Image: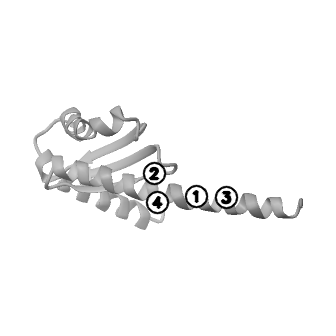
Amino acid sequence: MDLLVPHIEADIIATDTAHRGGRHRVMKRTIEETIQRAIPDAEVHVETPDGTHWSAVVVAPSFAGMSLVRQHQLVMGALRAEFDSERVHALQLRTLTPDRWRTELEERSRREASPLSIV
């Protein structure tokens, strides 16, 4: 009987992990779509290590001329229902204009190409 326990536990863990993974994908899509409805010109990238704590990078031309605080208020306001329902516990957020995003990518590329760069 003891030999079956690890297999049963492994099956339970695998099933639970698959179930949570499905929920994570649904919540990821919900977060992305919610932000895109509020900011139609946004490109949104969302990730999570655990399905509760999320990170998002939102790149939108409409952020041009807005303060960083206003950009974050716009995104966080769109997700108010997700926070109020506690489906989302935390969100690490980066908001950028396309020009700023391109500049950051170029800077990163130059650093990685430099023989003096520390990885």
**62 or 106, which lies in front?**
62
Closer to the eye: label 4 or 3: 3
Closer to the eye: label 2 or 4: 4
**66 or 77, which lies in front?**
77
Question: Mark 2 belongs to which amino acid?
Answer: Thr
Q: Residues within 10 Å of mark 2 (few under 14, many from 20)?
A: some
Q: Distance between the residues labelled 4 and 3?
A: 15 Å
Q: Which residue is drawn at 47% across and 43% down?
A: 52
Q: Is mark 3 on a helix, strand or loop?
A: helix
Residue, disc 1: 17
Mark 3 and mark 1 lie on one chain; the one further toward the N terminus is 3
Q: Residue at x 60, y 61 (%)?
A: 15
Residue, disc 4: 22
Mark 2 and mark 4 lie on one chain; the one further toward the N terminus is 4
Closer to the eye: label 3 or 2: 3
**74 or 95, which lies in front?**
74
Question: Mark 1 belongs to which amino acid?
Answer: Thr
